[in-house]
Amino acid sequence: MDSRVLAFNAFAIGASAYAFAKGGAPERIAGASLLAASMLTRLVRDSGPTGYVHPQLGVLAVDMTLLSVLVVLALYADRFWPFWIVALHALGTTAHVVKAIDPSVLRLAYAILVQAWAYPITVILIVATVRHRRRLLQNGRDPDWSIQPGA
């Protein structure tokens, strides 16, 4: 396995573990969703010599599912950061549509557009978890959801 893939896997697992251990419910849900999508992508991606020559339909399915989860999270979480993650992930997801519409898109450009957003998204998750911890220490609480049960 490529060392860049191993490095990203370690980064993603570390970020998700940090979100599970120190984050609120939105951070934990995002961490679990991002990690699951990363693992599923590895299973469905065509990494052979024809990878990224044609639209990666399995990866598109994983990306659309993740995008749906992230949109719901952004709508209900009492946080702003999920909107940034939705926007960045939507850019990567849109690359599949572009490749389907215009097959002449270079495979390297397509691969980069699909994958590059995972790094800033993971950084946002880490920063979001740090900020959640800071709000807990300063305020004693940090509501997870904008709509509270029973309200």
Image (cartoon, helix red, strand yellow):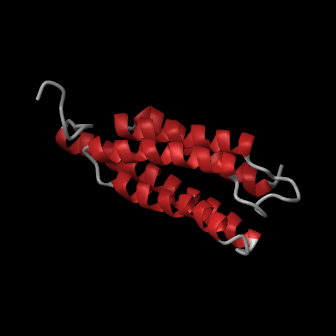
Q: Residue at x 51, y 39 (%)?
A: 33
**Along the horizontal axis of the image, is 35 left or right of 146?**
right
84 is higher (above) or lower (below) than 43: below
**Along the horizontal axis of the image, is 85 left or right of 5?**
left
Q: Position of residue 8 (x, y in %)?
A: 66, 52
Q: Residue at x 44, y 44 (%)?
A: 68
68 is higher (above) or lower (below) than 147: below
Q: Position of residue 81 (x, y in %)?
A: 35, 54
Residue 116 appears in the figure: no
Q: Quadrant of the C terminus?
A: top left
Q: Residue furthest right?
A: 49
Q: Residue at x 29, y 46 (%)?
A: 75
108 is higher (above) or lower (below) than 130: below
Q: Position of residue 105 (x, y in %)?
A: 70, 74
Please name whichever residue, 96 or 117, is drawn nearer the observer in this view of the structure.
96
Q: Residue at x 62, y 60 (%)?
A: 96
Residue 20 appears in the figure: yes
Q: What is the quadrant of residue 21 in the picture? A: top left
Q: Position of residue 88 (x, y in %)?
A: 47, 61
Q: Residue furthest left?
A: 151
